[in-house]
Image (spheres, rainbow, N blue to C red):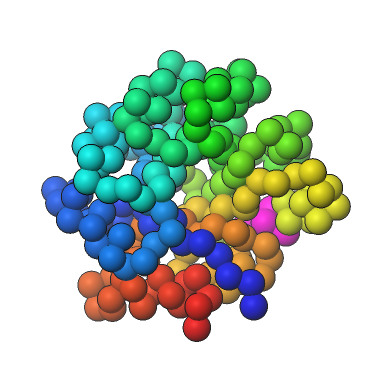
Amino acid sequence: MKKAKISASIIGGDMCRLADELKKIEQGGADMVHLDVMDGNFVDNITFGPDTVRGLRSCSKMFFDVHLMIYRVYDYVERFKKAGADRLTFQIEATEYVDDTIKFIKTCGMQVGLAISPETNPELLLPHLAKVDQVIVMTVHPGFAGQKFMDEMVDRIEFLSMMKKNHSELKFEISVDGGIHLENAKLCREKGADILVSASALFDKNRPMKEIIQLMRGDK
Ligand code: DX5
Ligand code: ZN
């Protein structure tokens, strides 16, 4: 059975104890940390920005996978680089200058990803697939943790997986973000997900995070 890496989204934790939550993610054995940056414009919610990412960077060496749900992506690229982001993924809907932004993120020395919202035509990804390190298939409307997984998005995982099978030059990883629980993680892996992003399911008070991560990843 195909395994997936687990990207633990810190917004699932207690927002007044971020450093402790980061430690929990590390000790729980997550493969990377997912940092959801929301600006109150692109989405109807505000989380945190580069200063918080920098603060967290000072207490962890984990891979920081920053998911930008903001406009003016280009203007923030260098700030997130300085803050310690390892990969910057932005919403394809957020800018007209997708190609330039991809190039700039790479020039700044980070990996780059594109995320796609449920209502956006997945064919818009096609011209960019050879240039990115990851595609995030949003399986909820971006903006909030704790929403329900949209089953109809599973086709997109399959579509991207087929693209990779048919075009060996495509090296991007397929991430799935939103509403991932133990009940649907296996299906996502089977359809081709390489990375599963999870917030609320991982921070379940009734079960150790380590156990949830192992099950979600497909270790057992
Ligand atoms: C939603 C964010 C997700 C969110 C996932 O806009 O991009 O990363 O944290 O939260 P859950 O796993 O609770 O759906
Ligand atoms: Zn996210």
Judged from this view, the residue extending furthest toward the left is: 16
**Residue 180 percent across, percent down from the top left:** 47, 63
Q: Which residue is painted at 65% across and 22% down in the image?
A: 99
Kindly tell me whether residue 81 is visible in this rendering. yes
Whether residue 94 sits left or right of residue 25 in the image: it is right
Q: Which residue is painted at 69% across and 53% down in the image?
A: 156
Quarter of the image containing the N terminus? bottom right
Q: Say which of 120 and 202 sits in front.
A: 202
Whether residue 181 sits left or right of residue 2 in the image: it is left
What is the span of residues highlighted in magenta in the rendered image? Answer: 153-158
Q: Which residue is painted at 43% across and 16% down in the image?
A: 75
Asked which quadrant contains residue 3, the reply is bottom right
Asked which quadrant contains residue 20, the reply is bottom left
Q: Say which of 92 and 30 sits in front.
A: 30
Judged from this view, the residue extending furthest toward the right is: 166
Whether residue 219 sits left or right of residue 12 in the image: it is right
- Which SS does the magenta portion mostly show? helix
**Residue 213 percent across, percent down from the top left:** 41, 70
